[in-house]
Amino acid sequence: MTFAERLADPGWRLTALLFLGMILSVAALRLAESTRLRRKYPRAGVVRTSYLVTYYGLESQPAGPLRSLGAVVLLKDGLHFRARVGGFELSIPAAAILNIGLSNTHRGRTLRQYVVAIRFRTSEGQGETAAFRFAQPGRWLTALRETLLPGRA
């Protein structure tokens, strides 16, 4: 079947249009998130950004690991996560961070991959851990430690 014959096939055209629609919707979501983050945080304060991060929740939350996709912004003075769906946001100031490391367990369950675990103190003084899966965990781990734990990394 030649390319011209495939173009004439309605099933192939529908599949191609659906695929193109998915790509365009993901691009539109990323553009909207990027614009929102640029408005919220001045470029001078942003060290690194990732739009495809999985957040596994806080250690103190009940039940097993939660999985929420969103964007993470590493700032010179902290870390900010915003979920793509639901609008959940988590900000962790650098001064509150106790430790940053890799882990394959979170919320009492073994995960299938390593996540970046950030141990910090809440505003109430309680110890808490948040876990994130990044596309490049080694690079993010280094950037997080160098930015948020200078002299302690």
Image (tube, rainbow, N blue to C red):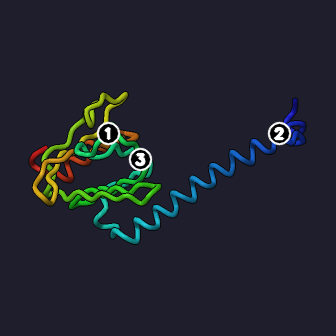
Q: Position of residue 106 (x, y in %)?
A: 27, 36
Q: From the viewer's perspective, is 82 left or right of 7?
A: left
Q: Quadrant of residue 76?
A: bottom left
Q: Which residue is mark 1?
A: 63
Mark 1 burial class by Cα count in 10 Å: few <14, some 14-19, many 20+: few
SS of the residue at dot 3? strand
In 3D space, how far apart are the residues under numbered discs 1 and 2 (Cα atoms)? 43 Å
- Asked if the residues shown at circle 3 and circle 2 are in contact, with their CB atoms under 8 angstroms apart, the answer is no
* Position in image of residue 114 (x %, y %): 32, 32
- Are there few (<14), some (14-19), or many (20+) residues within 10 Å of tag 3? some
Labels 3, 2: front one: 3
Tell me the tag on residue 68: 3
Residue under pointer 2? 11
Q: Quadrant of residue 64?
A: top left
Marks 3/2: CA distance? 33 Å
Give left or right: position of 132 versus 19.
left
Where is the C terminus found, in terms of image quarters?
top left
* Left/right of residue 150 with respect to residue 51 in the rendered view: left
At mark 2, the secondary structure is: helix
- Three-letter amino acid code at the position of disc 3: Ser
Pair 1/3: label in front: 1
- Residue at position x 26%, y 47% in the image: 143
The amino acid at mark 1 is Ala
Give the answer, above or below, for where 153 lies relative to 111: below
Q: Which mark is residue 83?
A: none
Which percent across, then down, holds residue 8?
A: 90, 42
Circle 2: residue type: Gly
Near-viewer residue (63 or 34): 63
Q: Earlier in the sequence, mark 1 or mark 2?
A: 2
